[in-house]
Image (tube, rainbow, N blue to C red):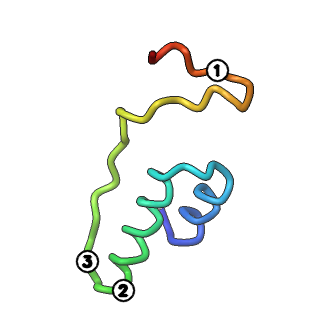
Amino acid sequence: MDNWSAWQIFFTTGSVLDYIRYKSIQDAKDTGAITVNREETDEIPNRGTDYKGTEYR
């Protein structure tokens, strides 16, 4: 994934994990390091703006 695609995904979702992916790609390009793309499985799913959040209480 390139820097621009990662930014577009973050801009669309607003997810902290997507920002971290974007920033790690940006930093890797700045330093010349290679990063490994891995899926994050511990993210709580976004249930929308009307979700009360009582499932985790």
Q: In this view, does 47 lie above or below 38?
A: above
Q: In this view, does 18 lie above or below 6?
A: above
Q: What element carries label 2?
A: helix
Q: In this view, does 9 lie to the left or right of 32?
A: right
For the residues labelled 3 and 2, the Cα–Cα distance comes to 8 Å
Q: Residue visible at 47% across and 65% down?
A: 22
The residue positioned farthest toward the front in the image shown:
57
Question: Three-letter amino acid code at disc 1?
Answer: Lys
Q: Is mark 1 on a helix, strand or loop?
A: loop
Question: Three-letter amino acid code at disc 3?
Answer: Ala
Residue 30 tag number? 2
Q: Residue visible at 42% across and 35% down?
A: 43
For the residues labelled 2 and 1, the Cα–Cα distance comes to 41 Å
If you read the primary sequence from the N terminus, does the residue marked by circle 2 or circle 1 appear first? Answer: 2
The residue where tag 1 is placed is 52
Question: Three-letter amino acid code at disc 2?
Answer: Asp
Marks 2 and 1: which is nearer the front? Answer: 1
